[in-house]
Amino acid sequence: MSDCSLDRITLAMVSLAANIAANHPKKGLCQLERLRGYGVAEEQLALVIDIARHLRNEAGEMLDQEFETASASAPVSAPAPLTLDNALPDGAACGCSTTAKGNACC
């Protein structure tokens, strides 16, 4: 086993966020209960959930916009591959915006 393992709370928070952001069918509910059992504050859980939902929703909006742009063009052609250079809105340093509750996601 590696010396750089994550503590159980960090691991459960990462797993919870990943499940939510990926829209996983299990929804991260197991991790949520585990974190509550570890005594993690509800405010911390709410922050992780807010950021994960924001990233999930932002990704969905970007995919929807790419589809709308592609379907609106008269000749049907393959869209340019999505890269870090063309995925970010103009002026966005990392593509990260704040959540609706004002939390930074990066």
Image (tube, rainbow, N blue to C red):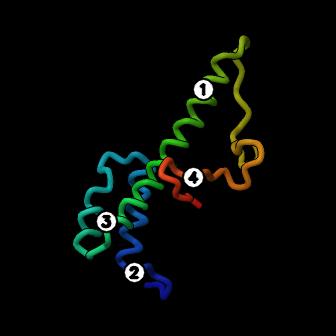
Specify the amino acid type for callout 4.
Answer: Thr
Could you tell me which residue is drawn at 74 percent across and 33 percent down? 80
Specify the amino acid type for callout 2.
Answer: Asp
Of circles 4 and 2, the one toward us is: 4
Report which residue position mark 3 lands on: 42
Mark 2 or mark 1: name the one nearer the start of the chain.
2
Q: Position of residue 76 (x, y in %)?
A: 69, 16
Q: Is residue 1 left or right of residue 77?
A: left
Q: For mark 2, give the secondary structure.
A: loop
Specify the amino acid type for callout 1.
Answer: Phe
Could you tell me which residue is drawn at 48 percent across and 88 percent down? 3
Q: Position of residue 60 (x, y in %)?
A: 52, 38
Q: Mark on residue 7? A: 2
Q: Residue furthest bottom?
A: 3
Could you tell me which residue is drawn at 32 percent across and 71 percent down? 41
Q: For mark 3, give the secondary structure.
A: helix
Mark 3 or mark 4: name the one nearer the start of the chain.
3
Q: Position of residue 58 (x, y in %)?
A: 54, 43
Specify the amino acid type for callout 3.
Answer: Glu
When asked about the image quadrant of residue 30, the answer is: bottom left
Could you tell me which residue is drawn at 55 percent across and 35 percent down? 61
Report which residue position mark 1 lands on: 67
Report which residue position mark 4 lands on: 98
- Rounded to the nearest angstrom, the CA distance separating label 2 from label 1 is 40 Å
